Image: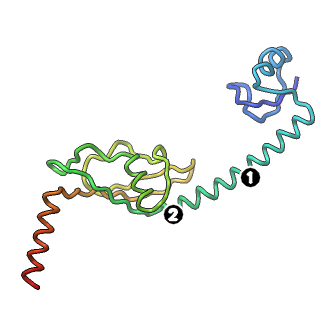
Amino acid sequence: MRVIFLEDVPNVARAGEIKEVADGHGRNFLIPKGLAVLASSPAVNTIEIQRRIQTKEEATLAVEVLELANQLEGKEVVLKAKVGAKDRLYGSVTSADIASELEKAAGLVVDKRKIELAEPIRQLGSYEVAIRLAKDIVPKIKVNVIEQETEKEAKKTEKEAKETEEETG
């Protein structure tokens, strides 16, 4: 019995494939569960049309991914974090933080799961981070983690700036 698989069936076939299967397996399992249909000529034509549409969509998606990769390559992201002793961060910088900062700074939307961090960043400094957009498309961005100014330091800096302005002016 020839059938067209509508869904992936482990160790048998992938969706869209046309295969010869045992009559009992097709009649009693695959067709009733909606995993496959008989390979009649209208069904084969429908599957071919679906394949063509899917191929066009994949090509369009590949172009979009390449454009995003070109925009991301070499980008620099600056993240501010509270710092404790020995330049250790309170908490850490995660892939979600990097993704949100990329969206704010550059307007580029990247899924946080595609950002490859071996472990969260817990130190001040500069890091090179890879973003796996597709199997072989992996642009790298630079992430700089700098110390966030506390309110006291900000007020102190403002006060110093005013004093210097008064002295000179």
- Number of residues whose C-alpha sits closer than 10 Å to that of mark 1, classed few (under 14), some (14–19) or many (20 or more): few
- Determine the secondary structure under disc 1: helix
Q: Residue at x 59, y 59 (%)?
A: 66
- Number of residues whose C-alpha sits closer than 10 Å to that of mark 2, classed few (under 14), some (14–19) or many (20 or more): few
In the rendered image, residue 2, in percent from the top left (x then y), is placed at 87, 26
Nearest the camera: 46 or 62? 46
In the rendered image, residue 24, in percent from the top left (x then y), is placed at 83, 14
- In which quadrant of the rendered image does the C terminus lie? bottom left
Q: Which residue is mark 2?
A: 71
Q: Which mark is residue 64?
A: none
Q: Are marks 2 and 1 in contact (CB under 8 Å)?
A: no
- Determine the secondary structure under disc 2: helix
- In which quadrant of the rendered image does the N terminus lie? top right
Q: Is residue 96 left or right of residue 83?
A: right
Residue 13 lies, with reference to residue 48, above or below; the image says above
In the rendered image, residue 160, in percent from the top left (x then y), is placed at 10, 71
- In the image, farthest residue toward the right: 41
